[in-house]
Image (cartoon, helix red, strand yellow):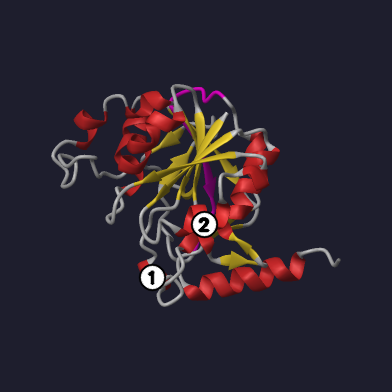
Amino acid sequence: MKALIFAAGLGERMRPLTDHTPKPLLKVAGRPLIVWHLQKLSAMGVTDVVINTSWLAEQFPATLGDGAAFGLRLHYSFEGPAPLETGGGMWKAMSLLGDTPFLAVNGDIWCDADFAALPREPAGLTHLVMVDNPAHNPKGDFALGDDGELHSDGPSKLTFSGIGMYRPQLLADWRSVIGDTPGAAQQPPRFQLAPLLRAAMTRGLATGIHHRGEWTDVGTPQRLAELDARVAAEAPAD
């Protein structure tokens, strides 16, 4: 099984911490954010991980190497100086991900969800982990029905955690979904993943699960500091 870690963001809201360090390499309890993901992916049996990069891209292989230290094979998908957004980043990485379902996770989140509990074969095109709405996203993203189906809208929307299982077919008709969105005509294309997820929901091909445990979108230095203190305090003593 393969996985994709989105790590190409510019980290602009994290300045000055990200002036010299890409956000996924910032540390929580002494461990880079992305390493928390790599260790969980390795433990669940993932063999290959694609990491898309842009800002300070050279630091990822310099820090993580080829993945042998984690029992993984790492592959780097460099997007150039300007990130391709989540959809474009996934599209560019497909040659490395292959034609079977894969797990994708945002490199700038921390979550105690059990990746191994996710279905290896989504019932539709995607299966997303949803979380309670944080203060910075009070209106949520998508609605999760009692039957596990995801909908673009609904009375009680949750926030997309940035963790999900995907079938490559989600991207099969991306041009008709994205249309003339700025960036879609460039090579490689630059576009967001959300419109494709909403299109899958409209067709009844998106499911999800509500994770009620720990989750943090590490979007500001304050959130990083709070997360670091909390995780360090909860870590077992040596």
Q: From the viewer's side, name the closer residue of 89 and 130.
A: 89
Find residue 54 and report its image quarter: bottom left
**Residue 193 appears in view:** no
Is 183 rendered above or below residue 21?
above
Question: In percent of the image, x 31 and y 32: which residue is there?
Answer: 199
Look at the image and say whether residue 133 sits in the magenta stretch: yes
Give the residue type at disc 2. Answer: Ala
Q: CA distance from mark 1 to mark 2?
A: 24 Å
Question: In percent of the image, x 58 and y 26: which residue is there?
Answer: 120
**Residue 142 appears in view:** yes
Circle 1/circle 2 CB separation < 8 Å: no
Find residue 237 and report its image quarter: bottom right
Secondary structure type for disc 1: helix
Classify 10 Å Cα crowding around label 1: few (below 14), some (14-19), many (20 and above).
Answer: few
Is 129 rendered above or below residue 24?
above
Question: In percent of the image, x 54 and y 29: which residue is there?
Answer: 147
Q: Earlier in the sequence, mark 1 or mark 2?
A: 1
Question: In percent of the image, x 54 and y 66: which residue is there?
Answer: 26
| Quadrant of the frame with the N terminus | top right
| Quadrant of the frame with the C terminus | bottom right
Give the residue type at disc 1. Answer: Arg
Secondary structure type for disc 2: helix
Residue lying at the far right in this picture: please name it.
238
Q: Which residue is mark 2?
A: 62
Residue 236 point in image, percent of width and height: 82, 63
Q: Which residue is mark 1?
A: 13
Look at the image and say whether residue 92 sits in the magenta stretch: no
Classify 10 Å Cα crowding around label 2: few (below 14), some (14-19), many (20 and above).
Answer: few
Q: Which residues are magenta?
A: 121-134
